[in-house]
Amino acid sequence: MSSLASPPPAPGAQWSPPAAVGEWCPLCGAALLGEQDWCLHCGAAARTRLAATPRWRAPVAAVAIVLLVSLAILIASLVKLIG
């Protein structure tokens, strides 16, 4: 067994964060230590920020319009050929 392992806490003892706390969890307010990326209390991403969603509605709408116009032209040409 490694001598670096810390002993388990005593029964009934409460855990308190070390004095060198740099930041706090944005979700639950628990202390974050060093380069800790995830909150050990609630599991939330402590320093990770999600990027905003890209603007995808305009390109999707443009593709849908092009497909609808193409389909309408195809149907019109088939009707003209058949009838």
Image: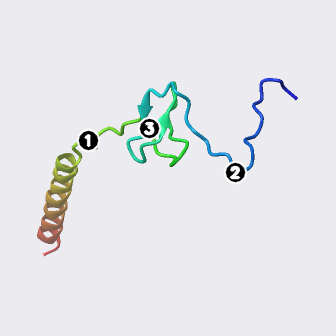
Answer whether labels 2 and 1 touch (C-beta < 8 Å). no
Which amino acid, by three-letter code, is at mark 2? Answer: Gly
Front residue (pair 73, 59): 59
Residue named by callout 3: 46
On the picture, is 22 further left or further right than 50? right
Q: Residue at x 28, y 44 (%)?
A: 53
Position of residue 48 relative to residue 4, above or below, is below
Query: What residue appears at the point 18 percent right and 53 percent down from the top-left corner?
Result: 61
| Callout 2 crowding tier (Cα within 10 Å): few <14, some 14–19, many ≥20 | few
Sequence order check, earlier mark of 3 and 1: 3
Q: Residue at x 78, y 35 (%)?
A: 7
Query: For the residues marked 2 and 3, what is the alpha-carbon distance in whole angstroms?
Result: 28 Å
Label 2 – label 1 distance at C-alpha: 50 Å
Sequence-first tag of 2 and 3: 2
Mark 1 is surrounded, within 10 Å at the Cα level, by few (under 14), some (14 to 19) or many (20 or more) other residues, namely few
Q: Which residue is mark 1?
A: 54
Q: Quadrant of the C terminus?
A: bottom left
Q: Earlier in the sequence, mark 2 or mark 1?
A: 2
Element under label 1?
A: loop
The N terminus, quarter of image? top right
Residue 30: x %, y % from top left: 47, 41
Read off the residue under disc 2: 12
Q: Pointer 3: residues within 10 angstroms few (<14), some, or many (20+)?
A: many
